[in-house]
C-alpha cells in the first residue's frame, strides 16, 4: 500500500482523476471499478473536464460500480445509477451498455449478485477499482463483520451508515436499509485499487484503515492485503497518520510519481 498526501481535497481529487486518465489512455479498453459518494464528485467533475478539454476517450471503456441500494429504481435520484449517469456517464462518450451496476430492483437478489460476479469475470476482472471510505471504515457497503473473502451479496446497512445517509433523504421512511455490494474478496481481486478520502471527519478512520490491524470490523483494512493499492488523502484527513512523513518522502522520491508532483 502507498499513501499520498495532497494539500487540499481539490488537489487529492485532481491526482486521482489523473491516475484514472493515465490508465485509460494506456488501455482504452480499461475495466474501471467505480464508487459513489460526495468525495467522488470532484473526481468525476475532473474526468468530465478532461473528456471535454483534452479528448479523454471513454468509448471503449467498461465500468462496474461497487454497489447499489435495494429497492430504488434507476429513475430515483437517490439511486447510484442515477448518481453515475448524472455525474459521469451522460457527460462523457461512454457507451451506457458498458456501464454496470447491480440491479437493486431484481426479483431474485441473490441471483442478481451471482450474475454480477459472473459479469465481472466475463470482462476479465476489474483493472482499476476506485474506492471511497464510509464513516465506519467500509468500502462499497461492506459494513462491519463483512468477511474478508466475501463476494457480491446483499448487506444490511449499519446504523452509522444510515445516519450518514439521513441528510440525503427528505423522507427517512423511504431510505433504503439494504444494498447489493461487491464483497471484500471481489474488490481485492481488482488489479489495482485507488482509495480517496478527504476531510477532517475521515482522519480517524483512515488512520485505522491504513495503519491499524486488519479486521472485518473495518473492511477498508483488507486493502492492506492488496499488492497494488494507492490511498490518496488531503492534509485534513492525514492528521492522525503516524507515518505521514515517511509517506511524503516516498511520494517525493518515487519516480512513478514524477509527473504527478
Ligand atoms: C457510501 C458508499 C461508499 C462511499 C461512502 C463515502 O457508503 N457506498 O462507496 O465510499 O458512502 O461517502 P462520502 O464520499 O459521501 O463520504
Image (tube, rainbow, N blue to C red):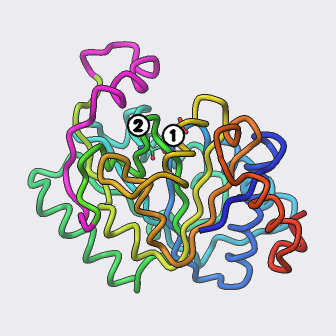
Task: Check whether the beta carbons of the residues at disc 2 and disc 1 lie within 8 A of each other.
Answer: yes
**The N terminus: image quadrant:** bottom right
Image position of 113 with respect to 60: above or below: above
Q: Residue at x 73, y 52 (%)?
A: 244
155, above or below 3, in the image: above
Q: What secondary structure is found at the residue carrying circle 1?
A: helix
Name which residue lies at 40% across and 76% down.
Answer: 189
Badge 1 residue CB within 8 Å of ligand 1: no
* Rendering coords of residue 134 (x, y %): 46, 40
Residue 44, x across and y down, in percent: 66, 50
**Disc assigned to residue 223:** none
Q: Report the number of numbered marks.
A: 2
x and y, in percent, of residue 238 in the image: 69, 42
Crowd class of label 2 (few under 14; some 14 to 19; many from 20; radius 10 Å): many
For label 1, the crowd category at 10 Å Cα-Cα, with few meaning under 14, some 14 to 19 and many 20 or more, is many
- Confirm whether the magenta stretch covers residue 170: yes
Question: Is 17 displayed left or right of 228 in the figure?
Answer: right
CA separation in Å, label 2 and label 1: 7 Å
What is the secondary structure assignment of the residue under circle 2?
loop
Residue picked out by circle 1: 205
Give the left or right position of residue 254, taking residue 229 as reference: right
Q: Quadrant of the C terminus?
A: bottom right
53 in magenta = no
Give the answer, above or below, for where 238 lies relative to 255.
Answer: above
Which residue corresponds to the image point at 54% horizontal and 68% vertical from the top-left?
A: 193
Outermost residue toward the front in this view: 242
Residue with the mark numbered 2? 136
Name which quarter of the figure residue 87 lies in: top right
In the image, the segment drawn in magenta is 149-174
Amino acid at each position: 500500500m502507498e499513501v499520498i498526501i495532497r494539500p487540499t481535497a481539490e488537489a487529492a481529487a485532481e491526482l486521482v482523476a489523473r491516475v484514472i486518465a493515465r490508465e485509460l489512455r494506456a488501455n482504452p479498453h480499461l475495466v474501471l471499478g467505480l464508487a459513489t459518494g460526495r468525495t467522488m464528485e470532484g473526481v468525476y467533475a475532473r474526468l468530465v473536464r478532461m473528456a471535454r478539454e483534452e479528448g479523454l476517450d471513454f468509448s471503449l471503456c467498461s465500468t462496474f460500480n461497487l454497489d447499489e441500494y435495494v429497492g430504488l429504481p434507476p429513475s430515483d435520484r437517490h439511486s447510484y445509477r442515477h448518481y453515475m449517469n448524472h455525474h459521469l456517464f451522460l457527460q462523457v462518450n461512454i457507451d451506457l451498455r458498458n456501464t454496470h451496476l447491480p440491479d437493486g430492483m431484481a426479483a431474485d437478489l441473490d441471483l442478481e449478485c451471482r450474475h454480477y460476479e459472473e459479469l465481472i469475470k466475463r470482462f476479465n476482472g476489474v483493472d482499476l477499482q476506485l474506492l471511497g471510505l464510509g464513516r465506519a471504515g467500509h468500502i462499497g457497503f461492506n459494513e462491519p463483520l463483512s468477511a474478508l473473502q466475501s463476494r457480491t451479496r446483499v448487506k444490511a446497512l449499519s446504523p452509522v451508515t444510515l445516519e450518514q445517509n439521513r441528510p440525503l433523504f427528505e423522507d427517512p421512511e423511504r431510505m433504503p436499509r439494504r444494498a447489493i455490494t461487491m464483497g471484500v474478496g471481489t474488490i481485492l481481486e481488482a488489479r489495482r485499487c485507488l482509495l480517496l478520502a478527504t476531510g477532517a471527519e475521515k482522519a480517524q478512520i483512515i488512520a485505522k484503515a491504513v495503519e491499524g490491524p486488519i479486521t472485518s470490523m473495518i473492511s477498508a483494512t483488507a486493502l492492506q492485503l492488496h499488492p497494488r493499492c494507492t490511498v490518496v488523502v488531503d492534509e485534513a484527513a492525514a492528521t492522525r497518520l503516524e507515518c505521514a512523513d515517511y509517506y511524503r518522502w516516498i511520494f517525493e522520491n518515487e519516480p512513478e510519481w514524477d509527473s504527478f508532483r
